[in-house]
Image (cartoon, rainbow, N blue to C red):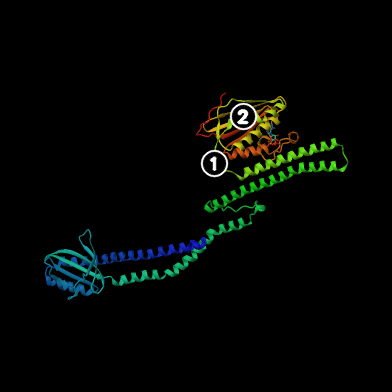
Amino acid sequence: MIRRLNIRWRLTFWFAAAMTVLLVIRSFWIYHMMERRLATITDVELNAKIDALEDLLRKKFELKDVKTSLERYADNQRDLQIEIESSEQDVLFRSHPGSQIGVDKVRNIQPDTTGRQYATNLSKDGDQRREVITVVPTSLGQVTVRISRSMQAERNEVWEFAMTLLKSLPMVILAAFGVGYLVSARALSPVDKMISTAKDITANRLDKRIDVPDTGDELARLAQTLNEMIDRLNTSFEEMRRFTADAAHDLRTPVTALRTEVEVSLMADQTVDDYRHSMQSVLEEAINLSRLAEQLLDLSHEDRGWNYDEQPKVRLDVILQSVREDLHKVAQQKQIRIDTQQVRPWTVKGDQVRLRRVFTNLLNNAIQYTPNGGCIWIEGTSTPETTTVVIADNGIGVPAEDLPHVFDRFRRVDQARNSQSGGTGLGLAICKSIVESHGGKIWMESTLGQGSRVYVKLCTSKSVGGQSIAE
Ligand code: ADP
């Protein structure tokens, strides 16, 4: 039932319950302490009286003198019961003849350092009495003196007090509920604020942030964490928006070109050669469009994520060899030489098709951005932990200011050189996405006019144990 209540009421309930338990325990504790205090006070009082009696007994030598003095003393101390016994246990004196100190139930007897004994007894009529016993050497020999006094009146008062405390319980519970509710409402008010701000935050209003209280407590940390989450969401939404806008822009250009080409050729009668020329342009744009569509699809697949852990081991050296063979003809057309270090088996965990796409893109770029007669190197190293492949070229390179952004989506370094190559600006972004989903890293070093080196670092499959590349 309690679980169904909201946090505010649950806190209130537990606070009130704790207060009730504490109050009950405290009432009993106070009662117990007061009882002990009462016994101590009574002991002090009885000790003073027994001291006086001891003085009296030590002074008097005749029994009848003692008796007369005791009777006079007892008459002045009517609430006291005094009993004196000889060492033979004969009763020498009893303050209230016929009565006997009621020892129905001896509750406790504790001798102190002076040899006096203290007891709390319960008489037959339920009267609780405190008793002090001492042995006094007199001229009549050793006598045992017992004096006692009823503690009932004080006890009743203590009991009354405890009862008053308990009777105030309903009031205390009510007050605890009230205080508990106010305290928890105050403690949770930042949460209410967070909820209302969070409700205001939508995909279009990701600029809003939750107020972080400067308390440094759990709620402040929660607000901080939520704000960090909103930051991340904002970044992703921004990226998505930019990506959609870029994609739309990049689709519009070839579509507009297509449309213009077709419209122009339909406007007037043209020769077969003119039509063929137009068709050639249409085909080129269509190829560009379909490449763009494919790359967008690739990216969306990568963004959806896939389970890298379940991937088998693949031979990176075999993939590189095959990519090289595939692009050999393209390189040959530009008289570009591709040098590959002779490698031993490099085994990494990953997806064969995706890794192949990475190295095809990289080698393709190297060929595209290297002038005729240039050179490309495929090299790398492998340790038991990582395998790093480098695709290097002595091509046109990338300006330093563009280098940090070449892996961004739709990022083209220079429109002029890309329009020649027909690049979409998505190739390196796809490579980055794939490499990172393999738990790897990709980066580029480049000098404008001198060439570029793209590094791909992947985890070596340990069970096989990658080996260093032969020099
Ligand atoms: P694109 O499809 O336009 O080639 P990429 O994402 O593959 O797009 O590359 C992004 C940009 O990085 C390219 O526009 C190109 O200018 C530059 N680039 C990529 N690889 C190289 C390279 N090997 N040499 C010089 N520039 C490169």
Q: Quadrant of residue 145?
A: bottom left
Q: Is mark 1 within 8 Å of ligand 1?
A: no
The answer to whether marks 2 and 1 mark residues whose Cβ atoms lie closer than 8 Å is: no
* Residue that sits furthest to the top in the current view: 471
> Which one is in front, 15 or 394?
394
The picture places residue 440, in percent across and down from the top left corner, at 58, 37
Q: Is residue 417 left or right of residue 357?
A: right
Disc 2 marks a residue whose amino acid type is Gln
Residue 310, disc: 1
SS at badge 1: helix
Determine which quarter of the picture holds residue 315.
Answer: top right
Instruction: Give the image location of residue 314, x and y in percent.
Output: 56, 34
Where does residue 263 sit, x and y in percent of width and height?
A: 83, 43
Which residue in the rendered view is the most extreme toward the bottom? 98
Residue under numbered circle 2: 321
How crowded pointer 2 is (Cα within 10 Å; few <14, some 14-19, many 20+) is rated as some
**Residue at (59% x, 30% y) in the render:** 318
